[in-house]
Image (tube, helix red, strand yellow):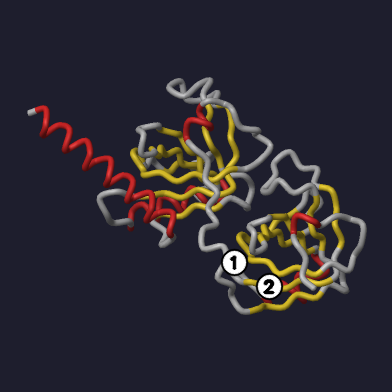
């Protein structure tokens, strides 16, 4: 019997869950040990982190990708202790040598997986910075690609600062580091449309201390390899965001016409 992700705890090993892989990335520890990390969600959108250690990567990594539904049997659960967390679950799944993972048919659940927060909450400093957040907005300033070391123009040294705006004219500064900076730069140059929508997932909130125009204000920034950045993705949340923008612009146009 498959169980609810919210019920997971270290009381046993013989858990069995059916989940969607919302995010998958590779990390390297300070000691150089590689691992695969994931964010998983069940049909009720209860989420948890997961980790495949180096010795099990070869056996399991090629079996699944972002967006797949999988069933996972027999795993360990450890308390999450990091300062930056991708979910609010107290425990992280750790795969064992005996863990079984198989792909299953996609489920109808989780059509909407973007749990974005409001811009005023980020700017108003009302959110717990321990937890990474998601945002959706249209790009109002694409910024410029820079490198910390101009003599070494590789993604390791890349940084790009850009601004996005919500439908209420709130603007948030976004700092993309490393490969995310080059990704935004490349995708922005290829993007087409009157409104270029940017979706950020698993970004951290920081208090700015560099740019004098944002000093003392909250900005968002990529965190390690787990952050996601998409330009004009084909997801329901983007369609809804554009519909809200279009409706507000139509209302503003109607108000202006009536005043004239």
The one nearer the camera, 181 or 232, is: 232
- Mark 2 secondary-structure assignment: strand
Position of 76 relative to 85 (above/below): below
Q: Quadrant of residue 96?
A: bottom right
- Checking the image for residue 219, the label placed there is none
The spot of residue 5 in percent (x, y) is: 74, 59
Q: Position of residue 133 (x, y in %)?
A: 58, 43
Q: Residues within 10 Å of mark 1 (few under 14, many from 20)?
A: some
In which quadrant of the rendered view does residue 110 lie?
bottom right
The N terminus lies in which quarter of the figure? bottom right
Q: Residue 235: image x %, image y %?
A: 44, 60
Q: Is residue 177 above or below residue 258?
A: below
Quarter where residue 167 is shown: top left
Q: Quadrant of the C terminus?
A: top left
- Rounded to the nearest whole Å, what is the CA distance between mark 2 and mark 1? 11 Å
Q: Is residue 59 left or right of residue 65?
A: right
Instruction: Tell me: residue 193, above or below residue 16.
Output: above
- Point out the residue furthest to the left here: 260
Q: Is residue 196 found left or right of 93 in the rendered image?
A: left
The residue to which callout 2 is attached is 70
Residue 154 shown left or right of residue 53 in the figure? left
Disc 1: which residue: 66
- Classify mark 1: helix, strand or loop: loop
- Using the image as rendered, state which of residue 259 and residue 23 is in the foreground: 259
- The label nearer to you, 2 versus 1, is 2
> Residue sitting at 46 percent across and 41 percent down?
160
Question: What residue appears at the point 39 percent right and 41 percent down from the top-left corner?
Answer: 144
**Residue 146 in the image, given as x and y percentages of width and height:** 45, 41
Query: CB under 8 Å between callouts 2 and 1?
Result: no
Residue at the image point whose x is 65% and y is 33% from the top: 128
Q: Residue at x 88, y 69 (%)?
A: 14
Q: Residues within 10 Å of mark 2 (few under 14, many from 20)?
A: many
């Amino acid at each position: 019997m498959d169980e609810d992700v919210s019920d997971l705890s270290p009381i046993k090993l013989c858990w069995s869950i059916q989940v969607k892989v919302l995010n998958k990335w590779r990390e390297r520890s300070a000691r150089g040990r590689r691992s695969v990390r994931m964010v998983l969600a069940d049909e009720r959108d209860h989420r948890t982190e997961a980790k495949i250690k180096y010795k099990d990567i070869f056996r399991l990594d090629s079996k699944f990708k972002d967006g797949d539904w999988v069933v996972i049997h027999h795993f360990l659960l450890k308390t999450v202790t990091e300062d930056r967390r991708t979910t609010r679950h107290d425990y992280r799944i750790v795969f064992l040598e005996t863990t079984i993972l198989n792909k299953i048919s996609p489920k109808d659940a989780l059509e909407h997986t973007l749990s974005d927060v409001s811009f005023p909450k980020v700017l108003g400093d009302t959110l717990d910075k321990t937890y990474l957040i998601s945002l959706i907005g249209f790009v109002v300033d694409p910024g410029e690609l820079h490198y910390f070391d101009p003599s070494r123009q590789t993604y390791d040294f890349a940084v790009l600062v850009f601004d996005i705006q919500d439908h209420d004219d709130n603007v948030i500064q976004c700092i993309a580091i490393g490969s995310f900076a080059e990704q935004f730069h490349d995708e922005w140059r290829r993007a087409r449309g009157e409104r270029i929508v940017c979706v950020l997932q698993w970004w951290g909130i920081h208090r700015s201390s560099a740019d004098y125009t944002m000093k003392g204000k909250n900005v968002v920034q990529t965190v390690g390899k787990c952050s996601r950045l998409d330009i004009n993705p084909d997801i329901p949340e983007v369609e809804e965001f554009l519909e809200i923008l279009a409706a507000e612009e139509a209302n503003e146009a109607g108000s202006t016409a009536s005043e004239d």
